[in-house]
Image (cartoon, rainbow, N blue to C red):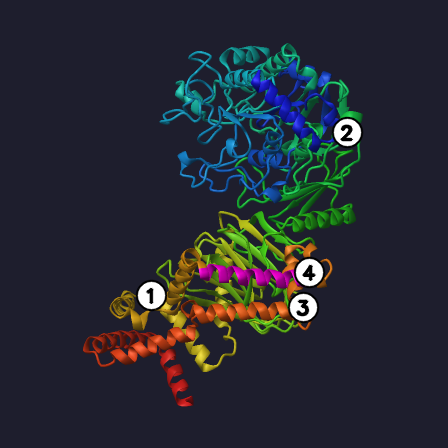
Amino acid sequence: MLRTVFILLFFGLTTTIRCPAAAAAERPPNIVFILADDLGWSELGCYGNDYNETPHLDRLARQGMRFTQAYAAAPVCSPYRASFLTGQYPARHGLLDYLRPDSNRPLTADHITLAEMLKREGYATGMIGKWHLSGYRYHKAAVELRATDHGFDEEIASEIKGVGNGANFWPYVFRTQPVKWLGIEKNRLGDKEYLVDRMNLEAVEFIDRHKQQPFFLYLSHYAPHSILNGRPDLVDKFRKKHPPGASTRERCYLCRDAGHKGDPLNHWAGDHNPHLAAMLASIDAGVGRILQKLDELGLAENTIVIFTSDNGGEKSVTSNAPLRGGKSQLYEGGIRVPLVLRWPKNVTAGSTCKQPTVNVDFYPTLLEMAGIRPDERQQLDGVSILETLKSGSGPSRDAIYWHYPLAKPHFLGGRSSGAIRAGNWKLIESYETGDVQLFNLAADESEIKDLSSEMPKVSAELQAKLKTWRRGLGVESDMDARLCERLRLRFQDNFAPVSDRWFFQKHWSIEDGTLVRNEFAGVNQRIFIKKPTIRNAVIEVDFSFRGAGEIRIMTGTPGKYNAVVHIWPNGFRVATARDRTVPHYPTIHGECAAEFKPNTWHTMMIEIHGDEIIARTDDDHAVVGRHPIIDRDRDYFALQVDRPGAAFDNIRISDAESERRGNWSQARERFIAEQNERPWLPREPVDRYRDLAMITRDRLFRTDAKYRELVNRIVECNAEERERFPDVFRTVKERQKQVLALRKSLLKNDAEFKELNDEINRAKRAEVARLHEKQDGLGELKPHAYKAALERTRLKFAKDSAFASLVARREQLEREQQTRYPQVFRSNQEFLGESRAARLRRNNEPEFRELLRRTADAVNAERAYLFEREPALEKLAARIKAAK
């Protein structure tokens, strides 16, 4: 009773954020989404199949709407499932291929999934069956995210390791493996429990368990994914109905384990496969049980029931005729799927929809059905087809897109490719060759006749449209990646509008839709992205010099820049900066002369994969590098400009493929050969010496044991200096930390210091308030515009008498604080002066002088070895000395 009262109160309180149509209903509709795995478009009776028997699904079609041109967002499973839950194309959410069991790239938790949206509106959310949106800890995946991490209250019968092994019967152990591949601890249907039957039971019970509140059930079958293995009684039935076709495999694990050779049990029959028919019959029986339960509970009228498949059928065990191709291919047989939807009183019974739709449309459609507005933070590619469901027709979409890049061909025959369907035209583009195929689906549903040569204008328009779409999602630019393929777009900003992930200070502002290092003075000012998380990555930045002398693109761990690209008007270099958390020296990997004209836009592409990096503006201007320090997680990204006068646009950061591109080895050799032949950019001898010394130290430290001993001797001497004589050798940074700790202590324990500090802060706020009074609209500006505008206002009204008085008051308070507490306002020069004074006092101490001598000997030995191993350094040193 209390639960019912709570539910009624909850929905009463939340109707204010529902759409009017939903507010009028007693409760929003329940949703049952049933997904088959690898079920071809023509396998159901309602789609014309006369071998398989699907009476309950056929009845569902008679009671609802059957779609003839419904599509999967990808020809394999993981991308489909991610697209269903996010409302995004795979090119946006980044799961472009099926996830391997050891994958460390799950569907990230930064999405607001369909389940989360429904859960926040009071839905009970349950996921039963195949998840496949994460790697598994069993397979040593570093990260495993489950359905319960993405908005599902319950997760039942989901896999805990790789799927598709045919172990569909209790105890769900494949061959001699030591564990169940499913998270099912006990059987409930006897020692011969069949997985589809068990999942159907769990689904019916979930509905019964949550009948008092709206529910979202995602029933995700593993069937009929191969290895096909149906219930023996049903297999016998269909084997008798029609002789199975010839086997497509000479070997079958399940037959071998049963003591047979070949495939006499017909698991791999190429047509009239009795196992496929049996598995589909079990799925259909479950649909019947679900429909019956909804009728029993009086919920049928207010429940949306959807049945579909995640991609086309596998050609080795079925036919997708009349469609061409199958799973893993972008022909219709790989991506067109059955779709049946029933929603009594809203969808016309027995209707057929010929309008194309794709599974990213489920997210916005189901939310609109439930009267829920999407969260603006979740960018959607799908469009609601509710009007189509209710009327049978609706506004046609511009196009449907596919992006399916593969490092190597899929084992079922799929190739790296993309596709677009616009109207009745469909174009498939090969990423391997650049060739295209053009089909008119209205006249050629089987994609037999390629019209690309006959209609080059249509082909060119569709290919350009496809490329523009990919560019908009950040998976393609004017330059192709060389080291690795782009995956999920992690960050993108073209500054119209501006991402809220930048950390703006007064030195940065948005002007004419670009990020600008503005006019305010300051050396080497940086702007950061808040909490980026990348490892292998493709980074693209458009930049323009407008008076600045150097631009840096920096990425790494906080304060540790393990990959830095320096750009000057006359060229660029790739370097790794010092990172004291790892035992490596900084180094310079190479330089490339280039002309970056002022007030002209240029693009820098940076690819990072493992321990390798390449930065280039095109294939003739590139620098490559390789270093252990690069092979790390990165949670830092910043742009740095030495002085005012630079602009940035179209910044994109994408995850990169886990495997390097197939031709990278040959490409690397060419880039390195060209890099070694190029002269370095002009430098003064002092700068050239510094750079060459840095490179040499890094090279020797990584390759030369004797040099490491020399360096370790210096490190030991320095450590002893700091330990025995801290007054001399304590660093400025260490002294700054002491002052900061003292300041914190005073704020906590000294009432007078805290009150004075609070007065200063109040004075600062008063200054800002006065500027807000003087400048209309200042307080309404967004963060990316506010701080620069505030500084301009400060300068504009510097002579305003009231403002000047406030400034004078604040400065007086600051002088008073510095006078009364000088110990927390010490400069770096004071610290250095203290160290020099301490050194002078200790110069006559024998122990001090002995330690200095040993340190000097260690330094001189290291320097001598550097000169011995790199004679050019000694020559540069002599040249510098002579010039002095």
**Residue 738, quarter of picture:** bottom left
Query: Three-letter amino acid code at disc 3?
Result: Ala
Number of other residues with Cα within 10 Å of mark 4, as a class: few under 14, some 14 to 19, many 20 or more: some
Q: CA distance from mark 4 to mark 3?
A: 13 Å
**Residue 785, quarter of picture:** bottom right
Number of other residues with Cα within 10 Å of mark 2, as a class: few under 14, some 14 to 19, many 20 or more: some
Q: CA distance from mark 2 to mark 4?
A: 51 Å
Which residue is denoted by mark 1 in the rendering?
Answer: 701
Q: Position of residue 157 (x, y in %)?
A: 48, 23
- Secondary structure found at label 3: helix
Can the viewer see residue 75?
no
Q: How many numbered callouts?
A: 4
Q: Which of the numbered marks, if any, corresponds to residue 772?
A: 4
Q: CA distance from mark 2 to mark 3?
A: 64 Å
- Secondary structure found at label 1: helix
Which residue is denoted by mark 3 in the rendering?
Answer: 802
**Residue 726, quarter of picture:** bottom left
Q: Position of residue 111 (x, y in %)?
A: 58, 40
Q: Is residue 67 above or below residue 540?
A: above
Q: Position of residue 708 (x, y in %)?
A: 29, 66
Query: Front-most of 260 and 332?
Result: 332
Q: CA distance from mark 1 to mark 3?
A: 61 Å
Q: Is residue 215 above or below residue 882?
A: above
Eye-nearest disc, 4 or 3: 3
Q: Is residue 58 magenta?
A: no
Residue under the image location 19 percent in, 78 percent down: 846
Query: Three-letter amino acid code at disc 4?
Result: His
Eye-nearest disc, 2 or 3: 3
Q: CA distance from mark 1 to mark 2?
A: 68 Å
Q: CA distance from mark 4 to mark 1?
A: 57 Å
Q: Which of the numbered marks, if any, corresponds to residue 388?
A: 2
Q: If you read the primary sequence from the N terminus, does the residue marked by circle 2 or circle 3 appear first?
A: 2
